[in-house]
Image (cartoon, rainbow, N blue to C red):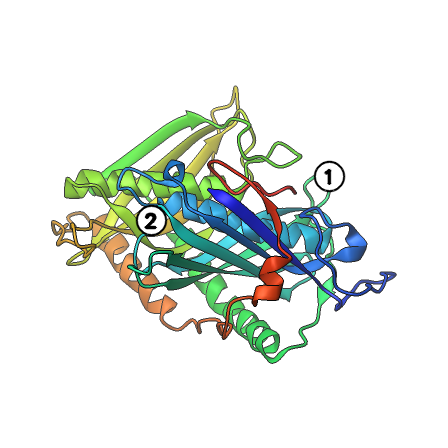
Amino acid sequence: MQSTQQVTREGSRHGVKGGRGSGPAEHTEPTAPPNARSHQTIHRFVVKLADAGIEGAVDGGKLLEWIDNAARATATQWSGRDSVTACVGNVHLDRPVGVGELVELHASLVYTGRSSMHILVTVHSSDLTGVKVAQTAQCAIVFVAVDDTGKPVEVPSWTPITMLELQRQRQARVRIPMRKRIEGAMAAESYTAAGTAPRTTLRFIANRTAVDSGGKVHGGRVMRWIDEAASACGADWTGTQVITSYIAGIPFYRPIATGHVVEVTARVIHTGPRSVHTSIDVVTTEKDSDQAHLAARGLAIVVSLDERGNARPVPKWEPDSAEDHRLDHHARHLLELRQFIEPFTTAATLPDEHERSNSTTWSSTADVRIQS
């Protein structure tokens, strides 16, 4: 990436027992002090060749990692604490993001609980040549602020002011019961050897890449592992390269520390005419231990694109065992539930030229570098 920029917007509307009021708005560095909390950050960059995957476009995992990084920057700046990813909502892209495109990620606080912060990340991507149609995608992520021991701590409450903020706060609040229902349905499913579906497992040891101050792996890196496993599983089934088109949610159950043995297993649970639905489990085992723990679970839909960018037909998977049929129904059920979730209201315009000219700028060669 080149010319990466970040704008931070100071939140003049927060309250904590014993807290201070904030002064006039100002542009701050990513590590804003507690008395200059920002409720929104904007990250802007041009995609470079180093960001592209095998298909010449940005992998879904790379994009998810960017989204998580941007959201974590907003959560950390608002809370003044380390913030960990608790769950990720659905995200859908109409087309791959290619090399040379301008990408903007707007990470906005839309709701606060006692220790949680709901962040909406809106992704804008546009081709500078004007050949490709601009697209917009949304992804809601919930973060929890933690202390040095990893325990949740109270965060400043956020009060919306504008009509857009009021609408988004209402939508975030309405989403909570449905999100819990979806997470409950995902947690209730079991995956055993009785299933006959194709599966792919990645095994490795978590290293110190993308970790917080406590040595825990960032949620964005786990999301990248999930995408890699789903893509490998989908490629095995279709016999072609695939890309992630839709993420239908990722709840996180426990942190992953450096040195943990990680197994990421993706299995086919449903196929559409042009899509492969995969369920992915991230399981970790501590060093010198035989006890495995489920750290995260996700549902990803991958597609194979032809030379014109259209999804190709995929081989149909027929459920065989009772577990196969149950999981095939589970995949359909989750997508049905997602249809009842109200999309967040989108902003009418991108930041104006004055805001762009006052952006904080730095360079990066392969990733969004966010100080937190």
Give the image location of residue 212, x and y in percent: 62, 37
For the residue carrying disc 1, how many other residues have a C-alpha within 10 Å: few (<14), some (14-19), or many (20+)? few
Q: Is residue 42 above or below residue 241?
A: below
Is the C terminus in the top left, top right, bottom left or bottom right quadrant? top right
Q: Is residue 84 above or below residue 36?
A: above
Q: Is residue 66 rendered to the left or right of residue 7?
A: left
Measure how far apart labels 1 and 2 are at the Cα level. 39 Å
Q: Secondary structure at mark 2?
A: loop
Which residue is pictured at 31% across the width and 43% down the height? 230
Give the image location of residue 129, x and y in percent: 33, 56
Could one spot residue 73 in this view of the protein? yes
Front position among marks 1 and 2: 2
Q: Which residue is mark 1?
A: 148
Q: Is residue 197 rendered to the left or right of residue 128?
A: left
Q: Is residue 363 above or below residue 131?
A: above
Which residue is pictured at 52% across the width and 22% down the height? 287
Q: Secondary structure at mark 1?
A: loop
Mark drawn on residue 70: none
Q: Is residue 164 above or below residue 64?
A: below
Give the image location of residue 183, x and y in percent: 45, 57
Q: Which residue is mark 2?
A: 98
Quadrant of the image occupied by residue 131: bottom left
Could one spot residue 253 in this view of the protein? no
Query: Which amino acid does the dot numbered 1 rest on?
Result: Asp
Q: Is residue 346 rendered to the left or right of residue 265?
A: right
Q: Residue furthest right?
A: 18
Q: Residue furthest bottom?
A: 163
Query: Which amino acid does the dot numbered 2 rest on?
Result: Gly
